[in-house]
Image (cartoon, helix red, strand yellow):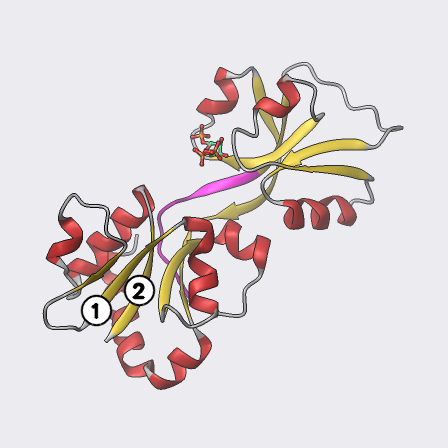
Amino acid sequence: MINIALPKGRLGKKVYELFSKIGYPCAELEQDNRKLIFEDPAATVRYFLVKPSDVAIYVERGAADIGVVGKDVLEENRPDVFELMDMGFGACRMCICMPDGYKEDTDSVLRVATKYPNITKRYYKSINREIDIIKLNGSIELAPLLKLSDVIVDIVETGATLRENNMHPETAILSSSARLIVNKSAYRFKCGEIDDITDKLKPFIK
Ligand code: PRP
């Protein structure tokens, strides 16, 4: 039995489709219901539906053997897991973004709103810029528009959210995509099965 933490939403759907193709289908998961745990009748796989930012927590603590999570989340939380492969989808960039026409005042502390305080702190430390972090949980683009912050550090995928709010990306600080991660002790005990999964996934990865 392999336990897989699936991120809820679009990414999870894509991940499940892949796992289903390589021999881990689970008919119950394809039904429209509110369940969070799904097991196939032959008990070869159990899927958990978790919030994308929580996938690595379930895997690090062994509640799930493997999971798929964005590189951005891995860089932010640096969980103690093995990163086995780049899944080749979910590509995006983490960027410093600002309102169009914004001019930075380098003499004052820069106010930065973000969901990613650790990545943000590390980046600004590396360029010796003093900042005040404003940690938000979503709709980050609102912060500079309401003068809550000067700039934001956020994920840019298509750039549409920025454009529609008269903002633009200035500097990319990280490239992200979905990664397959595994619990360290699960990898010792189930390495045959887990290596078999990565081998079967490889032909589907672009
Ligand atoms: C993410 C991110 C940006 C948006 C970028 O937000 O924080 O707001 O997607 O995508 P785009 O470049 O394609 O417009 P998400 O949809 O996860 O919602 P959130 O505001 O709750 O973080």
Q: Is residue 82 visible?
A: no
The answer to whether the residue labelled 1 contacts the one labelled 2, judged by CB atoms less than 8 Å apart, is yes
| Residue count near mark 2 (Cα–Cα under 10 Å), binned few <14, some 14–19, many ≥20 | many
User: Disc 1 beta carbon < 8 A from ligand 1?
Assistant: no
As displayed, is residue 93 above or below residue 110? below
Whether the magenta-drawn stretch holds residue 117 is answered as: no
Q: Which residue is mark 2?
A: 4
Comparing 164 with 142, the one in front is 142
Q: Residue at x 11, y 56 (%)?
A: 27
Q: Is residue 152 left or right of residue 137?
A: right
Q: Quadrant of the N terminus?
A: bottom left
Nearer to the camera, 15 or 61: 61
Between the residue at mark 1 and the residue at mark 2, the CA separation in whole angstroms equals: 7 Å
Kindly identify the residue that appears in the image at 48 percent across and 62 percent down: 57
Number of residue marks: 2
Circle 1 Cα neighbour tier, 10 Å, few/some/many (<14 / 14–19 / ≥20) = some
Q: Is residue 92 magenta?
A: yes
- Give the structural element (helix, strand or loop) at label 1: strand
Residue 130 position in % (x across, y down) = 83, 40
Dominant SS of magenta comes to strand
Q: Which mark is residue 45?
A: 1
**Horizontal placement of 80 versus 10: left or right?**
right
Dot 1 amino acid type: Val
Question: What span is in magenta?
Answer: 82-94
Q: Which mark is residue 98?
A: none
